[in-house]
Amino acid sequence: MNEERARGAISRAEKAEALLRNELLTEAFDYLETQFIEAWQASGVAEAEERERIYQLSQNLKALKGYFQTVIENGKMVQSQLDEFKRRSNFNKIR
């Protein structure tokens, strides 16, 4: 991975982290999760299709959160690799 792509991955990770720390976005995630659970609990025995739709919505919400988390983890891994590369470069300059 070249340095430009590495910096891009790190920048994306910082943006994803900022989103997951955003009070309004976390409130929205929590609100939707609560709404899905309440809708599932209120569904009747014969409403299997409605429960399936609620399940899919819940899974989509988890996937969205998971995507942000993956971007963050990838950025941290790239940052770690970049730090290691710089450390080795500095070590080799000293020798």
Image (cartoon, helix red, strand yellow):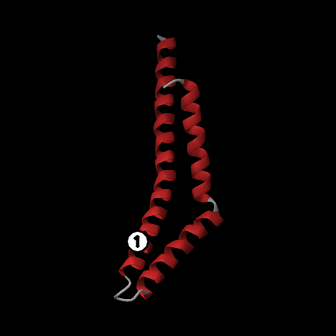
Q: Residue furthest top?
A: 95
Residue at 49 percent across and 64 percent down: it is 61
Q: Where does residue 86 sit, x and y in percent of width and height?
A: 52, 23
Q: Nearer the viewer, residue 3 or 85?
A: 3
- Residue 44: quadrant of the picture: bottom left
Residue denoted by label 1: 55
Q: Where does residue 51 sit, x and y in percent of width and height?
A: 39, 78
In the image, taking residue 92 as reference, residue 31 lies left or right, namely right
Residue at 61 percent across and 55 percent down: it is 19
Please, is residue 12 above or below residue 60 in the view? above
Please, is residue 53 above or below residue 67 in the view? below
Q: Nearer the viewer, residue 48 or 71?
A: 48
Question: Crowdedness of circle 1 by 10 Å Cα count: few (<14), some, many (20+)?
Answer: some
Which secondary structure, mark 1? helix
Count of residue discs: 1
Q: Where does residue 5 sit, x and y in percent of width and height?
A: 55, 29
Please, is residue 90 above or below residue 26 in the view? above
Q: Where does residue 14 sit, x and y in percent of width and height?
A: 59, 45
- Residue 63: quadrant of the picture: bottom left
Residue at 52 percent across and 78 percent down: it is 35
Residue at 42 percent across and 67 percent down: it is 56
Q: Nearer the viewer, residue 88 or 82?
A: 82
The amino acid sitting under disc 1 is Tyr
In the image, taking residue 23 as reference, residue 53 lies left or right, namely left
